[in-house]
Image: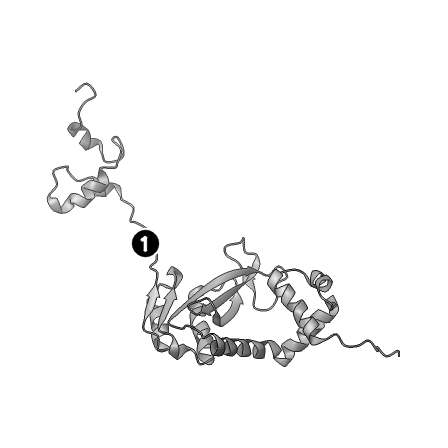
Amino acid sequence: MIADNRPRIPDRDCFTGILVRLVTGCSWDVADRLTPAGETTLRNRRTEWLKAGVFNKLVEESIAGYDKIIGLDLSEVAVDGSLHKAPYGGEGTGPNPTDRAKIGWKWSVATDLFGIPIGWVIDGANRNDSILLKPTLQAVADRGLLHDVETLHLDRGYDSNLTTQRCHALGLTDIVCAKKKRKPRSLSPSDCAGPLNAPTPGYPTLVSCAATPIGSANNDSDRSHSPSPSS
C-alpha cells in the first residue's frame, strides 16, 4: 500500500474555505476554487471539527471576546424566527408552510440591541416561532446572559398568554410584543335590519349600514326614505 505523503492542508486555509461557503452560500466546489483547500478536504475538515466541538467552542469564544472588547448591549433584546431552504433535507428539517411545503429549516435567534446573536436554536421549517421561544431564551441563559436582559421585543407571532407565562418563568417581565391584527367582524343581514330612527345606542350599527348599497339584502325598507330620481 502506497503511503500518502502529501502535507496536511493548514487549518487556517480550511477554515477560510468553510467561511467562504457560509458567508456567500456558494457550493463546496466553488469554495474549492476560491481557497487553497480542495472540496473533499473542506468537507472532511468540517466533519472532523464538528465531532470535536470546534465550532461550539468558537462561538463561545467569539461572544465572550466581543462582550469583553466592545460590550453586548442587553438593554433591548429581540427574538424572531426565519426560514431557510434545505433542498437535500436532513435530520431536523421540515416542510415549509410558506413555500409549497418544500423542505427547510427554522432558525430562532436572539440578538442584542445592535443585532449581535446571543442565543439560537434550529428546527424544522414547520415549527412555530412561539414554540421555539423558550429554548432560544434558554440558550441565552446557558451563556449567563439572560439575567442582564432588561426588555424583550417580540413580533405579533408571539402574542399569547403562554408567551407571557414562559417569559415570566425565566425571569423576564418587561416584554414588548406586537399585537395580532384582529379580523373585523363581518356584518350579517340582521345587523342592518333595524329602522332608521333607531335609538342612539344603535348608532354604530347605523354607520356600518350606511355603506350597504340600496337594493341589497334587507335594505328594501330603506327605499321609502330615499329621494326619488325626479325629486
* Kind of element beneath mark 1: loop
Q: Residue at x 47, y 68 (%)?
A: 109
Number of labelled discs?
A: 1
Residue 8 placement, left or right of 95: right
Which residue in the structure is indicated by mark 1?
Answer: 182
Q: Residue at x 50, y 56 (%)?
A: 97
Q: Residue at x 33, y 65 (%)?
A: 176
Name, please, the residue furthest toward the top.
230
For residue 133, which quarter of the picture?
bottom left
For residue 199, which quarter of the picture?
top left
Q: Nearer the viewer, residue 28 or 209?
A: 28
x and y percent of residue 116 in the render?
48, 69
For residue 180, which quarter of the picture?
bottom left
Q: Residue at x 34, y 75 (%)?
A: 168
Residue 188 placement, left or right of 86: left
Q: Nearer the viewer, residue 198 or 123?
A: 123
Name, please, the residue furthest toward the front.
69
Residue 203 placement, left or right of 144: left
Which image quadrant: the C terminus? top left
x and y percent of residue 39 in the render?
73, 66
Which image quadrant: the N terminus? bottom right
- Amino acid residing under circle 1: Arg
* Callout 1 crowding tier (Cα within 10 Å): few <14, some 14–19, many ≥20: few
Q: Nearer the viewer, residue 120 or 77?
A: 77
Q: Is residue 44 above or below residue 226?
A: below
